[in-house]
Structures are given as structure tokens and as C-alpha cells.
Image (cartoon, rainbow, N blue to C red):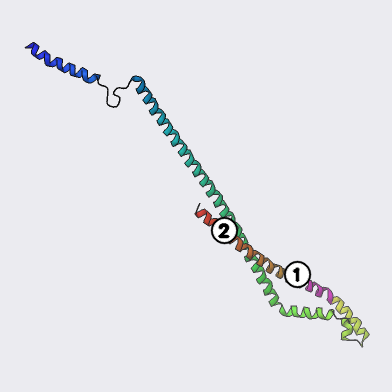
């Protein structure tokens, strides 16, 4: 009876020992050195993949930094152009206001300006103004000359002021033409810079 029980137990032990002696699937028939070499190769492949991943990460980081730098430069350029364009527009507004004020002053003083121009034309004649008025009366001529002499400094001052006013008007109109051209150039550059910023 005991012998009958021992035989199945011995058979079970033998089968277990046989199963333990069979190498796992995939490494059957490989020596320890071969398994070591395979492990080393797997480790090298993993390191190679890590280096590729690191290189790709560094490339993406450099590209992001380059794009960020371009965005900063383009944004700064847009701000600079906007400030310049606003300054030019302010200059245009100021010049146009100056022109409007000078023309309003000239229109308001139209009679005075016409009288001044008539006096200046009379002073340009070859004959002295007093003799032109009273050539037969020497005393009246002398008095007229004295009176005209007393009148001349204010007339000349008024003429000088008018000439300055007219020159300022002409200068402002010339400046408006130049500033308007500058504003158009700045507006075109600003549109280009904004487009570049949008597509950066």
C-alpha cells in the first residue's frame, strides 16, 4: 500500500524537476553569455532612443525659442511703427491747425492787409510820397515827408510781420505735404509689420 502511494509521488517530483530544467520561452538553448549580450544590446538600444528623444526635445526647444524671439522683435517693431505713425499724425494735426489759424487771421485782417499793400506800392514809386501829394507846396511837402517818416517804421514793421506770417503759412503747407507722404510710408510699413506678426 505504501509502495503504491510512493510511485505517483515520485512521478510527480520527476515531472517537476523536468519542467524546471527546461529554459523559458525565447531563451531556449542560449548560454548565459548570449543572454548577457542580448541584455547589453537592449540597454544600448534604450540609450540610443533616449538620445534621439533628447535631441528632438532640444530641437523643439530651440525652435520655440527662435519663434519667441521673432515674435518679440516683430511686436517691438509694430509698437515702434505705431508710435512713429501716431507722432506723424499729431504733427499733421498741429500743422493743419496752424494753417487754419493763419488763414483765419489773414481773412479777418483782409482790409488791413489790403491797405498795407497799397501803402507799400505807393512807397515803391520813384517820386517821394509827400511831393507826390503836394508838389506845389514845399512846406507841405516837408511836413508830409516828416509825417510819412514817422509812419514808415510801423508800416515796415507791419509789412515784416505780414511777410513772416505768409512765410510761416507757406512753410506749414510744405511741411504738411512732406508729413502726409511720411504718414503714407509709415502706414504701409505698419501694415506689413502687422501682417508679419500675425503670420509669425
Alpha carbons under labels 2 and 1: distance apart:
37 Å
Is residue 89 visible in the rendered image? The answer is: no
Q: Nearer the viewer, residue 119 or 57?
A: 57
Extreme residue in the right direction? 138
Stretch of the chain drawn in magenta:
151-165
Q: Residues within 10 Å of mark 2 (few under 14, many from 20)?
A: many
Q: Nearer the viewer, residue 70 or 38?
A: 38
Magenta part mainly helix, strand or loop?
A: helix
Instruction: Pinpoint residue 172: horizontal percent, then vertical percent.
Output: 69, 67
User: Of helix, strand and loop, which one carries label 1?
Assistant: helix
Where is residue 16, by image quadrant?
Answer: top left
The tag on residue 42 is none
Q: Going by the image, does 56 lie left or right of 109?
A: left
With respect to residue 151, does 62 lie above or below?
above
The tag on residue 190 is 2
Q: Residues within 10 Å of mark 1 (few under 14, many from 20)?
A: few
Is residue 14 visible in the rendered image? The answer is: yes
Where is residue 80, by image quadrant?
Answer: bottom right
User: Of helix, strand and loop, which one carries label 2?
Assistant: helix
Instruction: Pinpoint residue 5: horizontal percent, then vertical percent.
Output: 9, 14
With respect to residue 199, does 42 lie above or below?
above
Where is residue 88, by image quadrant?
Answer: bottom right
Q: Going by the image, does 66 lie left or right of 143?
A: left
Residue at 45% over, 33% down = 51
Q: Which residue is mark 1?
A: 164
Q: Is residue 57 magenta?
A: no
Q: Is residue 157 magenta?
A: yes
Kindly check if marks 2 and 1 are in contact, taking CB atoms under 8 A apart as contact. no
Extreme residue in the left direction? 1
Amino acid at each position: 500500500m505504501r509502495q503504491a502511494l510512493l510511485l505517483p509521488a515520485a512521478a510527480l517530483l520527476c515531472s517537476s524537476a523536468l519542467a524546471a530544467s527546461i529554459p523559458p520561452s525565447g531563451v531556449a538553448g542560449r548560454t548565459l553569455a548570449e543572454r548577457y549580450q542580448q541584455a547589453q544590446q537592449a540597454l544600448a538600444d534604450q540609450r540610443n532612443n533616449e538620445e534621439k528623444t533628447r535631441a528632438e526635445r532640444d530641437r523643439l526647444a530651440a525652435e520655440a525659442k527662435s519663434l519667441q524671439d521673432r515674435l518679440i522683435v516683430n511686436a517691438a517693431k509694430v509698437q515702434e511703427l505705431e508710435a512713429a505713425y501716431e507722432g506723424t499724425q499729431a504733427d499733421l494735426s498741429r500743422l493743419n491747425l496752424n494753417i487754419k489759424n493763419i488763414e483765419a487771421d489773414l481773412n479777418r485782417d483782409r482790409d488791413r492787409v489790403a491797405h498795407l499793400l497799397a501803402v507799400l506800392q505807393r512807397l515803391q514809386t520813384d517820386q517821394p510820397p509827400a511831393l507826390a501829394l503836394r508838389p506845389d507846396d514845399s512846406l507841405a511837402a516837408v511836413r508830409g515827408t516828416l509825417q510819412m517818416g514817422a509812419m514808415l517804421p510801423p508800416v515796415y514793421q507791419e509789412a515784416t510781420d505780414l511777410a513772416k506770417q505768409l512765410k510761416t503759412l507757406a512753410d506749414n503747407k510744405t511741411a504738411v505735404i512732406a508729413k502726409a507722404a511720411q504718414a503714407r510710408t509709415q502706414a504701409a510699413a505698419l501694415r506689413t509689420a502687422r501682417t508679419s506678426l500675425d503670420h509669425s
